[in-house]
């Protein structure tokens, strides 16, 4: 009796916790509301299954607990019931997978008008690079990284000269403009993670990864590293500010280009990573 | 298909070959220390696994103290936190759960349940344990190495794993970790081949594959999987060792560390992740399948009812085992691998939910119209279903690629995998120990201590890990020694963390009661007799309890039926042992 009651309490408690507790995701600040919706669908389906299974168990424990003189049924299998349950499960799984894959295909299809913004991770700070007036990022390579050229931009690539370099400072983004975040690391794995944007991706040295999103709300958002990157991992924080168009331009005008930042030493042609 | 109907009385081949003589030990050392008896090896494996598991438990307390009350404990620096975290994870997954389910339960139960006298290669079986012990000692040694153990996380992702920014990366810590894993895999392979060959070749007369208890099916399938999955980890460890010691670049691209260009170049960090998870995902099921098997037998025995849908249960185990080899990259959705992989791995991952759900349905349907005895093994089995269903369902969030994007690398993931492959299998371990302790020692474990242990562990573990999902949903990343003040998480998240820590310490304390019970009941437990649960499977039918070396006395048992003849209509008792020839045979004899 007590066991059945506690099983019921587990279900009721879990549902009440879900509804009443103050712990829920932060208000979204990007276009990925679809991800939140898929997650909500998943919550409904899985919550129903969890409650059904545990309540059924509670009923069985209550109804069929041992009593003197009562024998259990002898019932090796029931093909019909088993096939039926399999089919229902398959439908439930499809109901979660279909929207999931649909939204994933959007997630990996970058719109043509997205502006490129490069994030460069290093132990344990965030650097950024914007393409400058030509709209193209110059080539870069970790082997070109020096004190004067912290992002390893290829000095021989003309596209790189007007790139805006932001070392260990805040990133600003204009509202309602899709951005393609190009992710690079000069040392170990990192992961550019802003909870309010919902999207994230690892940064892998030696390759360029990406994700895209559209900021939908102005404000100041914290950047956290979400891939273990050594002792300072928990303290690798940064700030992204989503601005109105005017504020963004004002900020951009105050930034420094690669050409102005350094008079880089001449280095021979090297294998470069295409951004 | 093999006939699994209960009264198939064919399929008992005549004994054509004489039995081989076992090597019997003559002295104390060869009986208790360098023993070739699978049951002694099982106890050695279990004792070592529980001992190192205790270390992992203490490490988890230290981590929880830091997370619940950040800044209070000066000795828990970020370096120390990452070292505790790494060693906790590695010990729990490999050195405790894998070793305990396969080396412990596998060794004890396989020969007894299939009616064999011992494993087919007893000497290699003994070596398996001693190499495992060596692996554990090397692991422990890394705590005392200069710079301490590695703090790279149990996933050991390069490049940070062998760089100076990670604890133990440039010291001996990572080297000892890799050597220990390599030794573990060598030792495991010796044991694993034994378990597989014993199930295939060592079954007694009449024990067809489709009459085996599901415990044996679970351990057998998990072992086959482990023999296929561990080699991927083995080569990854060897290559990483080369990168660390010889300066090769298997996993190391050109990189600048602390302002200095390293001499590495051309390697792929993502290649390591593929190798690691090609092992790592099957590893989840290497732990889960023995638990599935064992819990099926616990439910059936203590509900006095045959397991519902036995054949479907066997096929579900085999299908889950096979599918688990094509889902590994669902751990890597945000790793930067080609995004098209997401479609494939999300689909395979969600498909695996179907056979898994069938297993859950069949467990609860076994309870339907049963004669449920709420013994300790049954309570743990019920708690397993609750936590496994909970943890399995949150897997549908993380497996569904785009839903994983916001949740990956948050505390949601930590809550999920602890619920599904920490709490759930450990509850089965406890249930199994309460169930088989009487066979191993001849005495019952103390019931009052057991009840206390059960309720605190079940309710406490649920109170730890259920709310933790919501910490992750808020956005708190995993592997952070402290979150500090952030805009997306309110102060109440910190109070929740403190609550979780208190629950964790309470559950930890209850485990001390369990360990005390294990020792106390050796002398003071109630005498159990040979078959206290009135169970059908062969291990309960041994002529003496605890069973001696060789298990069966003069003659091995002959099997006439499956392992689930409970409450058969018309039978005088509510169980018929597998080696009971039944009334027709009795009449004939």
Image (cartoon, helix red, strand yellow):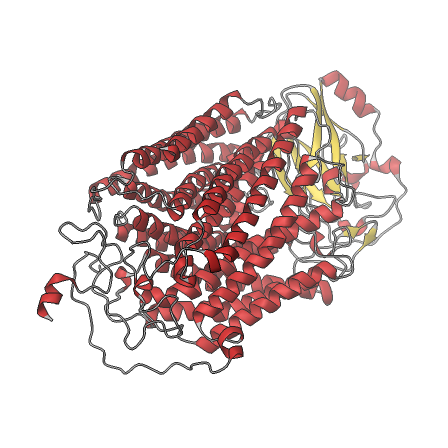
Task: Specify whether residue A65 is in view.
Answer: yes
Q: Does residue A117 lie above or below B333 as drawn?
A: above
Q: How many marks?
A: 0
The part of the image, by quadrant, that contains residue B108 is bottom left
In the picture, measured across the screen, residue A239 lies left or right of residue B363, that is: right
Q: Does residue A16 lie above or below B115 as drawn?
A: above
* Residue B486 drawn at (x, y percent): 71, 27
* Residue B157 drawn at (x, y percent): 65, 52
In the picture, measured across the screen, residue B242 lies left or right of residue B297, that is: right
Depth check, front residue: B242 or B579: B579
In the picture, measured across the screen, residue B36 lies left or right of residue B510, that is: left
The part of the image, by quadrant, that contains residue A176 is top right
Depth check, front residue: B540 or B296: B540
Q: Residue at x 51, y 61 (%)?
A: B46
* Residue B72 drawn at (x, y percent): 76, 37
Task: Specify whether residue A230 is in view.
Answer: no
Depth check, front residue: B1 or B444: B444
Q: Does residue B563 lie above or below A134 as drawn?
A: below
Q: In which quarter of the image is the N terminus of chain B?
A: bottom left
* Residue B64 drawn at (x, y percent): 65, 40
Q: Does residue B91 lie above or below A94 as drawn?
A: below
Q: Which residue is drawn at 80% across and 20% down?
A: A250
Depth check, front residue: A198 or B521: B521
Q: Quadrant of the C terminus of chain B?
A: bottom left
Q: Which residue is drawn at 60% across and 45% down?
A: B335
């Amino acid at each position: 009796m007590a066991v059945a009651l506690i099983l019921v309490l587990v279900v009721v408690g879990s549902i009440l916790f879900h509804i009443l507790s103050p712990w829920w995701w932060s208000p979204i600040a990007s276009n990925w509301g679809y991800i939140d919706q898929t997650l909500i669908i998943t919550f409904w389906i899985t919550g129903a299954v969890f409650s059904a299974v545990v309540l059924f168990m509670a009923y069985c424990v209550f109804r069929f607990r041992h009593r003197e003189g009562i024998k259990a049924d002898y019932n090796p299998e029931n093909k019909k019931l088993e096939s039926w349950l399999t089919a229902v499960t398959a439908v439930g799984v499809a109901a979660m997978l279909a929207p999931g894959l649909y939204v994933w295909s959007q997630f990996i299809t970058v719109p043509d008008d997205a502006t490129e913004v490069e994030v460069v991770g290093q132990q344990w700070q965030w650097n950024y690079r914007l393409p400058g007036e030509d709209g193209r990022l110059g080539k870069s390579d970790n082997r070109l990284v020096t004190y004067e050229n912290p992002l390893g931009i290829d000095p021989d690539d003309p596209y790189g000269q007007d790139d805006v370099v932001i070392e260990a400072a805040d990133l600003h983004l204009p509202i309602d403009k899709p951005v393609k975040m190009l992710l690079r690391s000069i040392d170990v794995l990192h992961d550019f993670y802003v909870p309010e944007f919902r999207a994230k991706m690892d940064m892998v040295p030696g390759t360029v990864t990406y994700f895209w999103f559209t900021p939908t709300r102005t404000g100041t958002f914290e950047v956290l590293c979400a891939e273990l990157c050594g002792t300072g991992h928990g303290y690798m924080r940064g700030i992204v500010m989503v601005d109105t168009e005017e504020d963004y331009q004002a900020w951009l005008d105050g930034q420094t280009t690669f050409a102005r930042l350094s008079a880089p030493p001449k280095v021979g042609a090297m294998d470069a990573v295409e951004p | 298909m093999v006939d699994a109907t209960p009264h198939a009385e064919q399929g008992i081949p005549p004994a054509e070959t004489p039995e081989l003589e076992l090597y019997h030990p003559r002295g104390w050392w060869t009986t208790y220390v360098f023993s070739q008896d699978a049951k002694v090896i099982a106890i050695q494996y279990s004792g070592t696994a529980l001992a190192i598991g205790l270390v992992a438990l203490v490490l988890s307390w230290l981590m929880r103290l830091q997370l619940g009350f950040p800044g209070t404990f000066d000795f828990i620096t970020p370096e120390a936190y990452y070292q505790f975290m790494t060693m906790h994870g590695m010990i729990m997954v490999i050195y405790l759960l894998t070793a305990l389910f396969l080396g412990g339960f596998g060794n004890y139960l396989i020969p007894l349940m299939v009616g064999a006298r011992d494993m087919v290669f007893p000497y290699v079986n003994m070596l398996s344990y001693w190499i495992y012990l060596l692996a554990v000692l090397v692991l422990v040694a890394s705590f005392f190495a200069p710079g301490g153990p590695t703090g790279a996380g149990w996933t050991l992702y390069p490049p940070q794993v062998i760089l100076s920014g990670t604890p133990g990366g440039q010291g001996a810590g990572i080297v000892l970790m890799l050597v220990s894993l390599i030794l573990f895999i060598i030792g495991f392979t010796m044991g694993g081949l034994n378990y597989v060959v014993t199930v295939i070749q060592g079954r007694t007369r009449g024990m067809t594959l489709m009459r085996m208890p599901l415990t044996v099916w679970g351990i057998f399938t998990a072992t086959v999987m482990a023999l296929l999955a561990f080699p991927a980890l083995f080569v990854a460890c060897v290559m990483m060792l080369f990168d660390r010691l010889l300066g090769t670049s298997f996993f190391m691209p050109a990189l600048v560390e602390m302002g200095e260009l390293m001499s590495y170049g051309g390697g792929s960090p993502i290649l390591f992740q593929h190798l690691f998870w090609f092992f790592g995902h099957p590893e989840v099921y290497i732990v889960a399948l023995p638990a599935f098997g064992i819990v099926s037998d616990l439910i059936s025995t203590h509900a006095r009812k045959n397991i519902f849908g036995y054949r479907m249960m066997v096929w579900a185990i085999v299908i889950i085992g096979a599918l688990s080899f094509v889902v590994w990259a669902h751990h890597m959705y945000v790793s930067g691998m080609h995004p098209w992989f997401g479609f494939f791995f999300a689909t395979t991952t969600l498909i695996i939910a179907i056979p898994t759900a069938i297993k859950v349905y069949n467990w609860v349907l076994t309870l339907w119209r049963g004669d449920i005895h709420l013994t300790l093994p049954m309570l743990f089995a019920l708690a397993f279903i609750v936590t496994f269903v909970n943890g399995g369902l949150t897997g549908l969030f993380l497996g569904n690629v785009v839903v994983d994007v916001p949740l990956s690398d948050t505390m949601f993931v930590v809550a999920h995998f602890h619920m599904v492959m920490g709490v759930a299998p450990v509850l089965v371990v406890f249930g199994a120990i309460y169930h088989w302790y009487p066979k191993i020692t001849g005495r019952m474990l103390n019931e009052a201590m057991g009840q206390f242990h059960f309720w605190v562990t079940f309710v406490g573990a649920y109170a730890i890990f259920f709310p933790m999902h919501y910490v992750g949903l808020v956005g708190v990343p995993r592997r952070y020694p402290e979150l500090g003040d952030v805009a997306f998480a309110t102060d109440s998240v910190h109070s929740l963390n403190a609550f979780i820590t208190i629950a964790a310490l309470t559950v930890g304390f209850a485990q001390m009661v369990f360990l005390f019970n294990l020792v106390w009941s050796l002398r003071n437990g109630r005498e159990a007799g040979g078959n206290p649960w009135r169970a059908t499977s062969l291990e309960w039918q041994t002529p003496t309890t605890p069973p001696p070396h060789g298990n069966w006395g003069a003659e091995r048992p002959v099997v006439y039926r499956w392992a689930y003849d409970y409450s058969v209509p018309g039978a005088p008792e509510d169980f018929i042992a597998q080696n009971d020839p039944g009334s027709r045979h009795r009449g004939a004899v």
